[in-house]
Image (cartoon, rainbow, N blue to C red):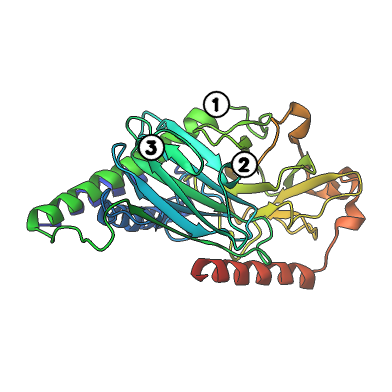
Amino acid sequence: MFTESFAAAIADAEKIVAEAPHVRTEQDLTEGYDYLAGNIRASLQMAWAYDRDFPYFVQSTGPCTKMGLDNPDTLYFHANIRADAEYVVTGRRGSTADLSFQVLNGDYSPVDVPDSLTAFDDRAFDIADDGTFEIRFGPGQAGPNYFTLGAGSAMLVVREVYSDWTAEQRGTITIRRAGTTSTAPPALTRDLIAKRYAAAGKMLTSRLKTFLAFPRWFYLNLPVNTMTEPRSTPGGLTTQFSSVGHYDLADDEVMIVTVPVSHAPYHGFQLGSMWYVSLDYINHQTSLTADQAVADPDGRIRYVISERDPGLANWIERTGHSRGYLQIRWQRLSRDLKPEDGPEVEVVPFAELAQRLPFHEQARITPEQYAERIAARQAAVARRMVG
């Protein structure tokens, strides 16, 4: 049977979810099975899109295929490549805050993070006045708009990052292997289909194991209800710094995360569940960019993480998640960040919130205004997902 190996992998994956160390409640398990469904979809897509001679960009993660604490502000794309071939990438730059490229020597695994062989943003190549560009990746020597593929190059990842969801427009991007225009891949065979089902099964269980292990490496060894100083993001995104942490809050507690307004073109804050994926960022305000947040008169942004509605513009909704992950990203940086650029974290009783926020009255909004913010999020995500 063609699907026998994949069916077995699904059964193994369900066991991985059910036995995950963080599962304590029915909500944890329910969300785990939802997470499993997204991983099944993603694994099949990745197995069928795997073609290094006739590659194309596929969306690596999205609202229905979440993984790796996906950034609500980012569209992720990837294509499989080989180090000894040349690839032509063409597109039109949109108006998003950042557009970055990264070449990896493999995929994430439960024991390792793939090496980043090349990483840069669109400041590293020429873009025409109409926004169009053409860049090449291959074994040749680096030069204008040409980037050398190092030994082991296996995947090209592209990130298109939004700061103002309502105003910025996505671009376009395509990839082809040089010399393959007007040709076609070989016809499908039974053996190839069987291999794809087997590969999808291996991807499925590996993804689950990897991103259950990942938080232990970078988050759970930190003191709870704290965040790190800004640091270069693991994985080689050279123009990105991040601050991370994990929280555990009672319903009558509020976390206040205070961070200076940044010079970075992109600065975003988000929560993640214990499955190491974003919370519902479409229908709830579980993340904010600098453009979406309201800065206080002292030049600082104060995020208020709470289960109860505090009536504030910068409320970050926990949506019933008493535990989870915290992440701030700064991208397209022109300098390294210092400790003073990072966050300060305080946990206070909900009843004392007004006394603990120095500009509490200025930060208040009405329920109607908050509903407008949610409606704008819903419309913006719908637009960018099909744009």
Q: Secondary structure at mark 3?
A: loop
Q: Earlier in the sequence, mark 2 or mark 1?
A: 1
- Left or right: 11, with 363 as reference point: left
In x, y percent, where is residue 216?
48, 30
**Picture layout, residue 117 above or below residue 65:** above
Q: Does the residue at mark 2 contact the one at mark 1 (Cβ under 8 Å)?
A: no
Residue at image x 63%, y 27%?
223
Pointer 3: what residue?
A: 108
Q: CA distance from mark 2 to mark 1?
A: 15 Å
93 vs 143, nearest the viewer: 143
Pointer 2: what residue?
A: 327
Q: CA distance from mark 1 to mark 3?
A: 20 Å
Residue at image x 91%, y 49%?
297
In x, y percent, where is residue 225?
67, 35
- Left or right: 66, with 5 as reference point: right
250 vs 143, nearest the viewer: 143
Single out the mark in the foreground, 2 or 1. 2
Single out the mark in the foreground, 1 or 3. 3
Pointer 1: what residue?
A: 221
Tell me which amino acid carries mark 3.
Answer: Tyr
| Quadrant for the N terminus in the image | bottom left
Q: Earlier in the sequence, mark 1 or mark 3?
A: 3
Residue at image x 35%, y 43%?
207
Q: Secondary structure at mark 2?
A: strand
Q: CA distance from mark 2 to mark 3?
A: 20 Å
